[in-house]
Amino acid sequence: MNTPKPAPATVRLDELPPRVCAVVRSVETDDEDTQRLKTLGVCLGRRVELVRVGDPLILKIFGSRLGLSAELARRVRVEVCLPDHCALKEDAGP
């Protein structure tokens, strides 16, 4: 008998531990802030890593680092990746 797996829990981006990979699952902001986040690369389905906590907190996206206010980070919910998930994808060659 197959038991369905529970949906992975999400956490606020500002609660993510440093050096942990996660995937953006929801953004709870007005249209202007949502557009600002998209411009920075923070959008649904995007893999991010928290590099440094604080205000601003530092994220790594596509190998680049960017600062994001703690206020805005509180409005982004992410799903923590499984251990070694991101390391395997980053190390994979062509």
Image (cartoon, rainbow, N blue to C red):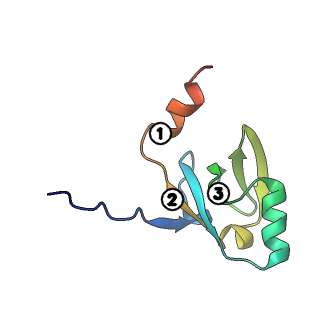
Q: Which residue is tagged 2? A: 79
Of callouts 1 and 3, which one flags the residue occurring earlier in the amino acid sequence? Answer: 3
Residue shown at 68% from the left, 67% from the top: 73
Q: CA distance from mark 1 to mark 3?
A: 22 Å
Side of 83 where 65 appears, left or right: right
The answer to whether the residue labelled 1 contacts the one labelled 3, judged by CB atoms less than 8 Å apart, is no
Q: Amino acid at mark 3?
A: Val
Residue sitting farthest toward the top: 94
Q: Quadrant of residue 74?
A: bottom right
Image quarter hosting the N terminus: bottom left
Are there few (<14), some (14-19), or many (20+) residues within 10 Å of tag 3? some
Q: Amino acid at mark 1?
A: His
Residue 85: which numbered mark, if any? 1
Of callouts 3 and 2, which one flags the residue occurring earlier in the amino acid sequence? Answer: 3
Foreground mark, 3 or 2? 2
Q: Amino acid at mark 2?
A: Glu
Which residue is nearer to you in this view: 89 or 84? Answer: 89
Of callouts 1 and 2, which one flags the residue occurring earlier in the amino acid sequence? Answer: 2
Are there few (<14), some (14-19), or many (20+) residues within 10 Å of tag 1? few
Residue sitting farthest toward the bottom: 30
Q: Quadrant of residue 45?
A: bottom right
Residue 28 image point, x, y percent: 67, 76
Residue 9 image point, x, y percent: 43, 65
Which residue is nearer to you in this view: 43 or 52? Answer: 43
Q: CA distance from mark 3 to mark 2?
A: 17 Å
Residue 53: which numbered mark, if any? 3
Does 92 sit above or below residue 68?
above
Image quarter hosting the C terminus: top right
Does 32 sit above or below residue 14?
below
